[in-house]
Amino acid sequence: MGKKLEVERIQTGVRMEKRMVKVLKGLAEYHDLGLGDLLEGIVLHAFEGKSPFSRKSQELIKDLKKVYGMDYGTEAAHRMVDR
């Protein structure tokens, strides 16, 4: 695991699509993480071009997307508009 890394965290005012947030919260809860910790892990993996999710987590995400009606994927990344 390595040496602890002391960091300074700040509050952010980001807005995200509602169903996506529900999926992320469900995933964080499953892994016993806070939402911020989950998002930090996702970003750190993405910055290095790595997938942050195991096959088991990917299956859970698929199920959570169905539960919360998140019926879109990466193709929607640049097409989302507010109501």
Image (tube, rainbow, N blue to C red):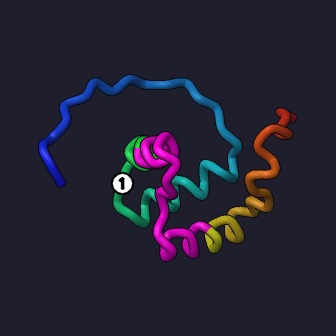
**Residue at numbered disc 1:** 33
Instruction: State the image coordinates of residue 63 (x, y, percent, origin top left).
Output: 63, 74
Instruction: State the image coordinates of residue 33 (x, y, percent, origin top left).
Output: 36, 54
Q: Residue at x 43, y 42 (%)?
A: 44
Indicate whether 80 appears above or below 56. Answer: above
The residue lying toward the viewer, choosing from 34 and 76, is: 76
Question: Does the magenta-highlighted stretch encompass residue 57?
Answer: yes
Span highlighted in magenta in the image: 41-61
Q: In the image, is 74 to the left or to the right of 64? A: right
Question: Does the magenta-highlighted stretch encompass residue 69?
Answer: no
Residue farthest left in this picture: 3
Q: In the image, is 14 to the left or to the right of 28? A: right
Instruction: State the image coordinates of residue 64 (x, y, percent, origin top left).
Output: 62, 68
Q: Residue at x 76, y 43 (%)?
A: 77
Q: In the image, is 33 to the left or to the right of 68? A: left
Instruction: State the image coordinates of residue 18 (x, y, percent, origin top left).
Output: 69, 46
The residue lying toward the viewer, choosing from 72 and 26, is: 72
Badge 1 amino acid: Leu
